[in-house]
Amino acid sequence: MALEHAILVSLLEQPASGYELARRFDRSIGRFWTATHQQIYRVLKRMESDGWVTAEEVGQDGRPDKRCWSATAAGQSALADWLRAPVQPEAVRHELAVKIRGAAFADRAGRADLVAEVERYRADHEAVLASYLAGERRDFPAPDPGDARAALQHVVLRGGIAYERMVLAWLDDVLATLRDLAR
Amino acid sequence: MALEHAILVSLLEQPASGYELARRFDRSIGRFWTATHQQIYRVLKRMESDGWVTAEEVGQDGRPDKRCWSATAAGQSALADWLRAPVQPEAVRHELAVKIRGAAFADRAGRADLVAEVERYRADHEAVLASYLAGERRDFPAPDPGDARAALQHVVLRGGIAYERMVLAWLDDVLATLRDLAR
DNA sequence: TGTATCATGTAAGGTGTTACATGATTCG
DNA sequence: CGAATCATGTAACACCTTACATGATACA
């Protein structure tokens, strides 16, 4: 139930329309919390009725009008309450791990297909790592000790980078193991 | 939608009652796929009507009767089909990362509380790592190149170990960053 | 003329969580 | 006698995903 809070954080960082929020959830915030635009519009409506956010109608030339959302004082206080609550244990769902254990019950051809799929998956993660590193060079070229927001954004990004590096190393281990079995 | 397939893998490894399955989802399988007993019973029923699993009634002395489930040939073939399909991109939901970015909008006391919470969270992950390492020593003391199932289970466990080590290192980074901001 | 982007939604269906429910045995 | 474990479920609700829907502008 942290979608509300992820939206609050994003709106406190910068007010936005539902559409812009949805794009952020495809990019920076999407690194650690995914949401579709349908979810976002629905939750924004609930948050509005709870008084956590307010919208300002913005007329635009040559584009549809938009509602620019920002967090209210009540929203910021709800976020502060949530920050104080314990972190919920995460629901782990790692499909590839299920497939790897399932490979024990596949034939030679099935395992060869899995090797190809792991290679494709590995290439995806290599691309994600490259984009994180590019983002780090772009957004955090030199540490600024006075900027708390940047320091916190940066440490979260470093977590993403560490995760991707770990995944790549593990996928090499997986590929070596699968190839060993094929011999 | 991999719960069905996680159940198939588990039943192929060893037939089990719904209750036993639920316990496995609290332990070994739960490392990469979580499920509650309610979900498991519901899905088992659907899988039975799809002909993927069959149950054998087992009467027990001093305990309630149980239904021992095993995968059918149709179930194993459904698993093989799924193994050939591309891995779906995972839905990332990392609450702690949201909280860390949210800490930019908290006061000193709120950040101090977050430090304490990160320390608690870190201790949890240290315990998980210790249990993985104990499981590795217990179940895979010496590699057996002929045992495909063990090799695949082991590489998945190594993934869990690598993940926990990465998380611990990152949490140290997070704690150092938060403490830096408090000075 | 077709595709991409901006902008906001509804509806249906599937999945997951929480609470409730039952009933026996084992162990302290 | 109470708590934990074994064993299986139902019901209600919350949440998420997918498909559908609309309509404007910008650009090739």
Image (cartoon, coloured by chain):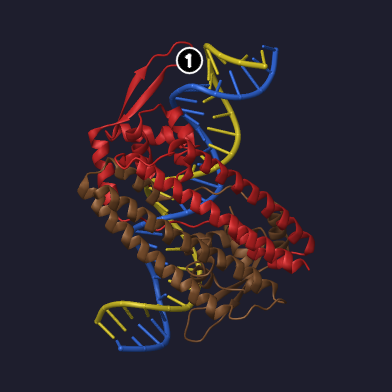
Chain colours: A brown, B red, C yellow, D blue
Name the spot of residue C6 as percent of width and height, x first: 47, 78
Local packing at callout 1 (Cα closer than 10 Å; few below 14, some 14-19, many 20+) is few
Residue A136: quadrant of the picture: bottom right
Q: Residue furthest left?
A: A109
Work out whether residue B118 can be spotted: yes
Can residue A36 be seen in the rendering of this structure? Answer: no
Task: Read off the chain for label 1.
Answer: B
- B59 sits to left or right of A41: left
Q: Position of residue A159 (x, y in %)?
A: 56, 63
Quadrant of residue B74 within the rendered picture: top left
For the residue pair A95 and A58, the one nearer the viewer reads as A95
**Residue at x 67%, y 72% (from the top left corner):** A149
Q: Residue at x 33, y 51 (%)?
A: A177
Residue beneath disc 1: B63
Q: Secondary structure at mark 1?
A: loop
Nearer to me, A153 or B154:
B154
Name which residue type carries label 1: Arg
Please name the residue shown 51% across and 47% down the image.
Answer: A91
**Residue B177 point in image, percent of width and height:** 68, 66
Give the answer, above or below, for where B138 lies relative to B101.
Answer: above
Residue drawn 47% across the image and 41% down it: B136
**Image position, residue A107 (x, y; %):** 22, 44
Residue D25 lies left or right of residue B99; in this view the side is left
